[in-house]
Image: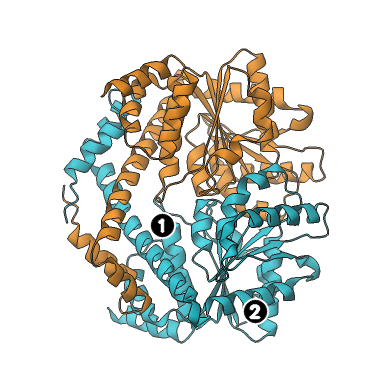
Chain colours: A cyan, B orange
Amino acid sequence: MDLDSKETVEKILGGDVRTAARLIRDIDDGIASSREVLKALYPHTGRAYVIGISGFPGVGKSTLVDQMIHAYRTDGKSLGVLAVDPTSPFSGGAILGDRVRMQRHGTDPGVFIRSLATRGHFGGLTRSTHSVIDVLDAMGKEIILVETVGVGQDEVDIVTTAHTTIIALIPGMGDDIQAIKAGILEIADIFVINKADREGLKRTMNDLNAMLDMNSRWDDEGTWRPPIMATEAIRNKGVPELLSQIEAHKAFLFDHSKMHLKEHLRKRAFRELVDTVKESVVTEIVQKLENSESFQGMIDDLVEKRTDPFTLCEQIMSKQKLTG
Amino acid sequence: MDLDSKETVEKILGGDVRTAARLIRDIDDGIASSREVLKALYPHTGRAYVIGISGFPGVGKSTLVDQMIHAYRTDGKSLGVLAVDPTSPFSGGAILGDRVRMQRHGTDPGVFIRSLATRGHFGGLTRSTHSVIDVLDAMGKEIILVETVGVGQDEVDIVTTAHTTIIALIPGMGDDIQAIKAGILEIADIFVINKADREGLKRTMNDLNAMLDMNSRWDDEGTWRPPIMATEAIRNKGVPELLSQIEAHKAFLFDHSKMHLKEHLRKRAFRELVDTVKESVVTEIVQKLENSESFQGMIDDLVEKRTDPFTLCEQIMSKQKLTG
């Protein structure tokens, strides 16, 4: 590791905001030297408690996160906040970073807020998210809030690396909510129905409860049944109760006799390793493909239907034999 | 190709619904034999016009799609409809398939509706979506509607394989809409603001227009500036106008002097090839990883911070040397 990287590592372990901001920008831009720094930071990670929050636009996630920041700050905790926006591949991080809620905490040295938007071409966003969480963790942040816009597959992969995953909804989202329920059921540790003063709260709660009831997993005493919380974030209603539930879930995870934390850490390590390998391999193969002389011809063949993607793929794979 | 596969190919080219349904189930389940059938179908694809529709839950996409189906059927067009739900990895296709809107067209032989939900572990959903579109295309469907729930990265990848990509919004979705706008701007061919009777229509339209104005791309006469349509799908208001805009975009694409269609087809072929290779490579490497003797030890090393994911990845990659 060169001197610059060494200095970066030391400064980040000391909590230096400016150095961390630069490193995170390098990560987002896919700059190779950031890897050496991340390697050196890795042994210093694992102390922060990571909370993931996902939910569709319009559910008031921003306000909810803002109130959570406020509550944790009042409690004296240091915070790292990461906003991940897989839907803005071209916008850079600026848009989320500028959001209104950020401003009230902008001058508080106990809160460090960053956003990630560059997904790279091949699933780099999930890999970058792991990295930024590691940076915030190595900086000594006690709580890390990871917020994603939307509930697509990327978002699911991102929030489930958290210790506690919160899914935010609003009352009466229509029949689409029926369609997504089964998916989010599997990843939520806590459900929050925000804007609880709106019509349809009871029905949404009943629907969620009915879905949970159908799942036999909860029969086992050693499992965590996700609680359903009603909040009105804008009036700070229900937020202290939400924080209590996060504490309860943390206590559940850290109950050593039950080994839940170990299981969680192994799952998270597996996912981080797979995402790293995946990004590496796919980047390498696709670059090779795009740079190969025969590439334009392959695309022509596909467009003209002289071949098909599977046959082409087999040809590419047999040339790029994966030995090992 | 075995006799069974040959028969499957012939039946699908003849439009047989039962055979197509079975093949699509095989694709969703990742059954290997479906590849041989897909290879044989590929030369028969490329005739359908593919329309992608994406948007967050609650914007009334279901109703919009229902009205579009109705309008195209009235016009005598045969339709394939594919609902993709990357947020329900565990629910199978049943939930979307059962959705209310499906029922009114359930007995119409001119409409074939399928849903996909299994994402597989490593980006298989996007690959499967290409395949199902190819099946519907080979069946002779004139119009294929691809609907996704949510607007995450997967959804973006999916809808942009369409000839015309529609992004559905509603008035006044709050500040989250600000955050996603830049991303969806890049992919939308047409914006639909549904539930146009709601408060905030004018502001949302102005906001979108302002974003479009900022993009210098439209200065070029040879580019398509996405129109912004207001609809009330539930009253069928604005739907005929939407269909006219789809026709206009199609005419733009098929204007041979401008080569837009060729560019689109090459982009789509590239994406399909990359998705195929990606799925193949990642599946192979990750399976190898999970089956290797040292795998559990690697995870232990990560959890105990004895190594880091990047160093491990380099070790794995150097062993599985990609020659070629």
Q: For the N terminus of chain A, which image quadrant?
A: bottom left
Residue at 79% of width from left, 70% of height from top?
A: A237
- Point out residue A100 in the picture as x, y percentages from the top left corner: 69, 65
A1 lies left or right of B162: left
> Disc 1 vs disc 2: Cβ atoms closer than 8 Å?
no
- Point out residue A284 in the picture as x, y percentages from the top left corner: 27, 52
Total marks shown come to: 2
Indicate the chain on which mark 2 is placed: A
Which residue has dot 1 on it?
A: A124
In the rendered image, is residue A277 in sight? yes
B146 lies left or right of A241: left
Q: For the C terminus of chain A, which image quadrant?
A: bottom left
- Point out residue A53 in the picture as x, y percentages from the top left corner: 60, 64
| CA–CA distance in space, label 1 to label 2 | 31 Å
For this rendering, which residue is in front, A35 or B257? Answer: A35
| Label 1 crowd bin: few (<14), some (14–19), many (20+), radius 10 Å | many
Q: Secondary structure at mark 2?
A: loop
Q: Which of pointers 1 and 2 indicates the residue nearer the eye? A: 1
Q: Secondary structure at mark 1?
A: helix
* Amino acid on which the number 1 mark rests in the picture: Gly
**Displayed quadrant of residue A106:** bottom right
Indicate the chain on which mark 1 is placed: A
